Amino acid sequence: MHAQETTFSKLVQGEQQFQVPLYQRTYSWQRDELQQLWDDVQELVEDRQEGRPGSGHFLGSVVLAPERVAAGGMQRWLVVDGQQRMTTLMLAFTALRDHHRARGSAKKASRINDLILANAYQDGHDSYRLLPTQADREAYTACVDSLPKAGGAGNVGAAYRFFVAALAEGTESGGEAWVDAVESVLGDCLSIVAITAAEGDNVYRIFESINNTGVGLSQSDLLRNYLFMCLPTRGEDVYRKRWLPMQDLLGPAHLELLVWLDLVVGGNSRARQSEIYRDQKKRLEPLSGDEAALEAEIARFSLRADRLMRILEPERESDPGLRAVLERLSRWGGQIHYPPALHLLDLVDEGRTTAAEAADALAYAESYLVRRLLAGLSTTGSNRVFMELPKELDKDGSPAEAVRRFLSRPRTGARVWPGDDAVREAVRTRPFYKTGRSNQRFQILRRLEESHGSSEPVDYDKAPLTVEHVLPQRPAQQWFDLLAEEAADGESPEEIHNLLVHTLGNLTLSGENARLSNHPFHRKQELLDSSALRMNQHIAAQERWGRTEILARAGELADRVVQLWPAPLEGVVQADDEWAGWRELREILLAVPAGTWTSYGELAALIGTSAIAVGNHMSGRKGLHCAYRVLTADGRIAGGFRWADDDRHSGDPKDVLRDEGVPFDENGRASKAHRLSSTDLAVLVGKEIPEESPAGPPAGSAAGGDEAATRFTTLLRANQTPEVVEGVLAALRFWEEQGGYQVYGKATETSCFPTLDAGGPNAPRTLWPIGVYPVSGTAEVVFQHLKRRPPFDDEPLRRGLMERFNAVHGIDLAEAKLDLRPSFPLEVFATHGEEIRSVLEWFVHAVALAEARRPVGP
């Protein structure tokens, strides 16, 4: 075997083809892996544009085995290992080629196509530089060949759409120079080690050995080995007194985190966690002959380990004010605040600032995060902002004012710290319930409640509180009658409901979610009035609950928000004053898969405006991706629809949609099975679906579920026919006979999830094929969750499940929803219960077969 370091463009150049063999798994990268790669690319692009000599980024290795030489001298290679990276880069270049085409840069597009993607002088399958395994081939070639179904469902289509969206977003702020830098980085700055096998080598044996090796050394392991190699006389004593206690305190994962944070706080704001060892070794090499200096470095690591533990476990912090803000940031989740927090604790412990000053500084950092979430701004770029903060803290003056001054600095939309006016408007109009992560939404409501200063504070660690909609998500007619009283001319109660239901003014915390349900307001008043939460008592004091009351409460909450989370410096003019909703609209449209459609109302519900406003904004607008996939609520082309001048399509939009896979009926209405709801759209752009909603993951447990089981059965009998009830219960009994059990949701509509245990004691996991909703009368097939759980993280297995469900009469799951939660009516259980039980049995057997094949042992 031969190994050589190269770049992607050099690897694929020339008349050659890379084939992914059948024994390789299908393409499996998802948003997290794609985002990590894109973050690395962005860093290299910034280095390149700012004139900093970059060292590149090591992407990994590919193992290639030679195949026969095809006619015309084309060399074929089998991709034994590394197909995920190669496929990802090919899809990134495909999106880049299409980006150039859309902007009229035909020469740039042709260069990418001919040098990276295609063998111009070959035909058929030989024309593709990369030929994926058969299960991925159709989706991949649709992208490379720019077919109508390019960017459809599945991991390949999702990766292509990810890069299309990323390029569109970056171009808005960086222009064509930025795009050129991206192309250069993708081709020439990502280092790859190409390992080529010799003819006659057993390729499958190579594949087995690569994928069955033990766990390698971590970055901190490598650093430890290097340090103690440089301590020949003091090593044993230093290890026992310094390193080992620190290692025991932090554990392996947090030790690696400390070593990375040490680089960031030390001024390397571009340190990557994947390259900790390289950067720390480079920093420490001048001290390699000085054992005393190296021991001092390890002692410094040890001091910072204690400070890191105060960030990870804020109860260790002795100052109450600093402890409080560390606790809030810890509950917020993530590691974004770690760099400035660690350096502030350095300054406090070294006597260079006070604990109160450090608390104020972190409060500004917290405000930056909270206000951006309320305004619906993307998290893109925030990590970089916080990694640059430690350098600001070393400047003269107050650390708190340094943080406020730095975060207030004018930036483009991705990094804006919203002012008071923007926050007040967002509180009134934004769908807060579908913004950010569920724990972050909870923490904002919690702090708003705590701001009332109750004499008997709530114990949030014990109280099972969830977010509650006062105006219900699925209201009864009484609620619509109330809203109709406030409707303006041409405005329906349903439109008012969609605009208000998810806003902060309509949300509270409650431990009575199931009891509150969608009851009329007078019934909710009784329960809210008995709550210990002051915000609930204020709601209960209202005589009614409609638009007037919701907007009034939004105003009161906005007043609290701007007091609790301080504003940026006055007089700072941000570089981008476009409403965040329109940026979000462009992001959503880029994420809509081929073969699906959505409505103006669904888009409006997600970005916090009206369907009419969305339609007016989109009308004939240039550069708006795939606007033809947005239809009226009943699935028709809007009467005023016009192709934009720069759109590559023309003619009847229905013909374009049909080519992509959307069926239309004889009345010109698109199939409802292919429609994307606001919840589907939220998933596609990476938003976290609220876990307390029916669209979230199952909650509860098999143990102690008798009360939930009774609620589910009661709701089922109250809302469905006896035939449907018996069909559903028969399927659940059958599931138990196969070794499964039921898990029940905690939302208002008590849902049921037939669940299996898998993975064994070392890596337990649960799997469930469907969620059954007794009131709405639907069963959702949970591809969205299965795609992250073995064995259904393998796309062909999910497709197999979809095909089996679709073989049942009455079930029509759109292929384009393979990554979502398509549904079918519960009536099918009554008429084709035996066929559904057969699908459930296949699911159980598929899991059992995968478990039997799973390697045993470490």
Image (cartoon, rainbow, N blue to C red):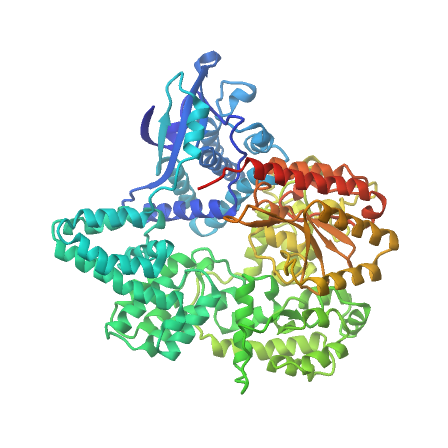
Residue at point 32%, 41% (across, down): 56
- Of 123 and 357, nearer the camera is 357
The reply, left or right, for residue 202 in relation to residue 236 is right
Residue furthest to the top in view is: 71
Determine which quarter of the picture holds residue 346: bottom left
Tell me: residue 605, above or below residue 128: below
Determine which quarter of the picture holds residue 299: bottom left
- Of 132 and 672, nearer the camera is 132
The reply, left or right, for residue 461 in relation to residue 318 is right
Residue at point 73%, 81% (across, down): 526
Residue furthest to the bottom in view is: 455
Q: Quadrant of the C terminus?
A: top left
Determine which quarter of the picture holds residue 185: top left
Residue 72 in the image: x percent, y percent?
46, 12
The answer to whether any part of residue 375 appears in the image is no
Residue 298 in the image: x percent, y percent?
22, 58
Residue 245 in the image: x percent, y percent?
28, 60
Q: Quadrant of the N terminus?
A: top left
The reply, left or right, for residue 278 in relation to residue 822 is left
Residue at point 27%, 71% (across, down): 347
- Numbered disc total: 0
Residue 458 in the image: x percent, y percent?
55, 79
The answer to whether any part of residue 194 appears in the image is yes
Tell me: residue 188, above or below residue 339: above
- Of 617 and 315, nearer the camera is 315
Tell me: residue 649, above or below residue 776: above
Tell me: residue 328, above or below residue 843: below
